Amino acid sequence: MNTFGRSFRVTTFGESHGAAIGAIVDGCPPGVEISTADIQLFLDRRKPGTSDLVTPRRESDLVEILSGVFEGKTLGTPIGLLIRNESAKSSDYDELREVFRPGHADRTFFEKYGIRDHRGGGRSSGRETAGRVAAGAIAAICLKKRKISIAGRIVEIHGESDPALFEKEIKEARDKGDSVGGIVSLTISGCQSGLGDPVFGKLDALLAGALMGIGGVKGIEIGSGFAASGMLGSEHNDPMTPEEYLSNNAGGILGGISSGQDITIRLAVKPTASICKPQNTIDKTGNQRSITVGGRHDPCIAIRIVPVAETMAALVILDTLLEQEKYAAWKEQE
Amino acid sequence: MNTFGRSFRVTTFGESHGAAIGAIVDGCPPGVEISTADIQLFLDRRKPGTSDLVTPRRESDLVEILSGVFEGKTLGTPIGLLIRNESAKSSDYDELREVFRPGHADRTFFEKYGIRDHRGGGRSSGRETAGRVAAGAIAAICLKKRKISIAGRIVEIHGESDPALFEKEIKEARDKGDSVGGIVSLTISGCQSGLGDPVFGKLDALLAGALMGIGGVKGIEIGSGFAASGMLGSEHNDPMTPEEYLSNNAGGILGGISSGQDITIRLAVKPTASICKPQNTIDKTGNQRSITVGGRHDPCIAIRIVPVAETMAALVILDTLLEQEKYAAWKEQE
Amino acid sequence: MNTFGRSFRVTTFGESHGAAIGAIVDGCPPGVEISTADIQLFLDRRKPGTSDLVTPRRESDLVEILSGVFEGKTLGTPIGLLIRNESAKSSDYDELREVFRPGHADRTFFEKYGIRDHRGGGRSSGRETAGRVAAGAIAAICLKKRKISIAGRIVEIHGESDPALFEKEIKEARDKGDSVGGIVSLTISGCQSGLGDPVFGKLDALLAGALMGIGGVKGIEIGSGFAASGMLGSEHNDPMTPEEYLSNNAGGILGGISSGQDITIRLAVKPTASICKPQNTIDKTGNQRSITVGGRHDPCIAIRIVPVAETMAALVILDTLLEQEKYAAWKEQE
Amino acid sequence: MNTFGRSFRVTTFGESHGAAIGAIVDGCPPGVEISTADIQLFLDRRKPGTSDLVTPRRESDLVEILSGVFEGKTLGTPIGLLIRNESAKSSDYDELREVFRPGHADRTFFEKYGIRDHRGGGRSSGRETAGRVAAGAIAAICLKKRKISIAGRIVEIHGESDPALFEKEIKEARDKGDSVGGIVSLTISGCQSGLGDPVFGKLDALLAGALMGIGGVKGIEIGSGFAASGMLGSEHNDPMTPEEYLSNNAGGILGGISSGQDITIRLAVKPTASICKPQNTIDKTGNQRSITVGGRHDPCIAIRIVPVAETMAALVILDTLLEQEKYAAWKEQE
């Protein structure tokens, strides 16, 4: 299942150290102005090598639009997106041909498929998200025309919620050859009420599925989240006046349908699995091994998850928006 | 979207106070022994009116198998499941024809569809889950043949984690006309490695989507969950020996694929939205109103979510298991 | 796969001699006026026992709406439809427990599933189409509001194209214990241009798939059909004037998209497989057997396929119409 | 909808005169030996410019595998396939920016999307099928490992069924600036019984949908096809002996499930719409125009449809085979 969405469908492909990464966007409305530069802005935010807090792997991550856009506008036909892999230093990964890295998908991929591309995690690499981001950029551009915006940010690193200390936490871990986790918050603003389809296509369910599918995410909260479990109904219910909701414990979604309030989400991100400390593991033949993961890694993947989470949320919101349009259109014609 | 799953597909229907609730199960393997009594066991766990901690609404919730089972075994054809609604005291709900209850989907359903069945929440009622449970019971029975079991339980009520205090918390809230939230844990045991499909059908993503789609769930954790955000990579990675994983922060899923360890999940459940205290709200024409929700309600829906969460998880696991079988079968024939 | 459609999704269930036949319609626009009587009109056209040219099996085929309709209007939630089987004379079918009828799916169902309900063909019986017709009736009612109509009729029986001879051909075959085939034509009128989705959801492809899936259909033509293979391009192309297309060899579909002309289709229907003459066959253990099929059968299923074909076409047209609405809505808001 | 299949899913992209054509194959079993050369063999059969009976447009149609294959074997991850467009003489098509060609999708695309790539038909060009053929080649290679083969051939051109006259018919039409239709037959051999899913995923329905979705196909027959409509049941039913079916009017499919016999199909293909004779048409603003279609065209597209039909059939057969494997696997483990 490398396809996401019902109306706005994204199919991605690509291994970390293969020839290319990319995506096909199917179901984009026709007539939308899209340029390579528009998409590139999103990719550049996700790109490695941009600061000393992220992996030094160098990828220009230049996207090429292969189809579906003609004279600057979408045709309604599928949009092919291609990003060539450049910095594919496969030799870094020779040891990994036989040994499974702890915290990674090396072993589970092998057990599932009986074969794997060991170079940089292959398909399970975070690099896979470049395809999602390129596709999600198009969704975000469409949403902007509807005045819907999605903003993610880091709200905690290694238990610290003071932004002044984020860099310190990351560098301390990195300097010890270790890594840290964090929490990402996401706010979706300007979203109309009525999006999401009960009972198996609820908006919160779709968002949870989309965001839990980002590598490294271990928890998701909508609105009050886990705090709700400690509350009384009289505290949690959001009262209404003719003008507004007086609080937003619901996180902008009631009964799986958007209420028109801001949609608020929090994501728990685990520490990067690749660390330079020796770890106990096994190899393909089941023998005990110790491994120290070389290569170039992010000390805190939460940072680079921010643009990925934004674009995944954009895919969900645009998809449910297009699904809802057909019924709205029907009613207007009645 | 009232259909769930790819290989084992469940489609449900039914409003709280309509004629009936039910489901069609499509894609159940043929030759599985299934009886009405087997399914009834699961429904009885979800059923209202079973103790003084849940709603006194009386529903016998008797399921009828309409098709797909012949001489006690599944045919491989769709299994129709029917549960008649009995205790449909619609008059309890006359006030709700015009007024939106806080914390409920009354307003969002109206804004989405322009029409709604106001009686007991209609399709947004927790009663809808009877259809899921009947269908999920069949999944659980299939999984039992593969020695996979799923067990849910309450681990926190209103912030209390001592089981001795759960009843006290619930009764205290109920006696004040209020309600409480809680946390449900779920453990899936006996699950083989290899289930789940990167990148948009990851097992954790499917579980998160399935469980966040249960009414009242506001947060989900897999394995270490939010605690992961405060950990170092060297603490979080699960080391391996030839015999076993030495810890389970991953929660049994790595890279979206089951590892063979127990799959561990926690769900945050909000307090029941229906409370007997007066609340500020609006009506369909936008006027300010005060509402005190009558009718028969659960003071803590977390309790009744346990069997629903178990059966939703069963649907996900069986579905991914059947998806995986085709590739396993392919390899065997190579 | 017992689900059909993307936006307007129909899932059916039921065996010929089980407890019931039925369907769930998911994705019907909200606010549409629907009554049991409206649906019953369509079922009555398909119903057995209505003349001496069709099977004398008596089924009242009364449909019950279980959900999704409230105070006479659709809610936008799934519509459950139930038809109880009444005339289930299973004993007629005792011989078929072991023996495979030629021309039927008895053997292939057994080879696929390893188990089957032998009574009247079980799921492979034409009775299954009652569920489709009930669901398709709702689609047809929706289309009527858009002034789209679908009309089927018999145009050939046993090679005869003179309607005056249809009854004679059928009775002659029936009196000899035999059956006859025929050709059904279908005309869809009032359909706007723009329906259908290249390249795998072309309107002609969807119609062909929908109609070939009706038991007994062996061939399908759109517009010029097989005659096109004998034509020159200069004969086949439909010239255009500002007012109209000057011919309709395309059958109302160009490049998989409706053109606004009438959509014209022809279906080849095989003779009913159940005949009273002795036939050579085998049983479950592979032994040679002779069989004379008892029970109550149609001497010419083409007749009863007419309303089934109309409703299947209605499902396709409404589904593509709803798919198209979302993009139309998008453009209007630009 | 540019995605085809359930288990073996193909998503294609690309316009005739855009940057590239291609596909993503998702769900290919892991461990299958695949090379660029294997796929190229199939593309070369479809390629333009290979004889004087087909279009002289020159395209090398070289395919690049972008992902999903590692050290010569499939990984189970999506396989990205890329074919660059080379011979994109857009200037040939300048007139078509404003004028709709009769028999083409120019007008319906414009009416559907409100925008179109006029160069060579854009997405509606037969060139789109290169993506399908590349993907279907992989399916055919997988099927070969199961000893299933698919062979297509021309059986009629312009009403002539004598192969000695095919070339004559085509050249005669071409020399007059005209084009001719034809009939393609397809035989699928070696296919096990049990493929296809009643009631909406019947094997004949899937094949009909897949093949009617090839541009220019106007009719489809399975087995006896339209001849069935003129037969008696006693003639049409295929008798069985312990060793075999004694005839094959069913065309290898009974009740939508393969019987193990050869699957036989016939396709009616219309004459190429592009002809050099003047034709009456209209332009985008609705004015009457005359058009003579320049560019490079096939005088008989039936010829080049043969490899496309074979690969589409391969996609259907492999998809249903993988779907069936999961239930077969389940039974084995019971």
Image (cartoon, coloured by chain):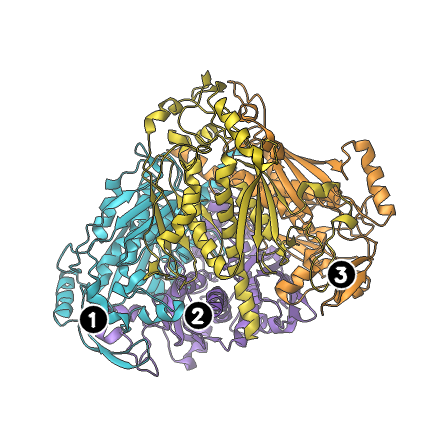
Chain colours: A orange, B yellow, C cyan, D purple
Which amino acid type is marked by label 1? Val
**Residue A317: percent from the left, percent from the top?**
57, 39
Under tag 3, what secondary structure?
Answer: strand
Q: Chain of mark 3?
A: A
Determine which quarter of the picture holds residue A88.
bottom right
Between residues D46 and C168, which one lies in front from this camera angle? C168
- Location of residue B41 with respect to B327 vertically, above or below: above
Circle 3 sits on which residue? Answer: A281
Circle 2 sits on which residue? Answer: D173
Query: Of circles 1 and 2, which is in front?
Result: 1
Mark 3 surroundings within 10 Å by alpha-carbon count, few (fewer than 14), some (14 through 19), many (20 or more): many
**Residue C221: percent from the left, percent from the top?**
34, 62
Q: Is residue A50 left or right of residue C31?
A: right
Between residues B52 and B300, which one lies in front from this camera angle? B52
- Residue at coordinates 65% horizontally, 70% vertically from top-left? D73
Circle 1 sits on which residue? Answer: C293
Name the residue at the right extreme.
A175
**Residue B274: percent from the left, percent from the top?**
47, 27
Q: Is residue D179 left or right of residue D83?
A: left
Mark 2 surroundings within 10 Å by alpha-carbon count, few (fewer than 14), some (14 through 19), many (20 or more): many
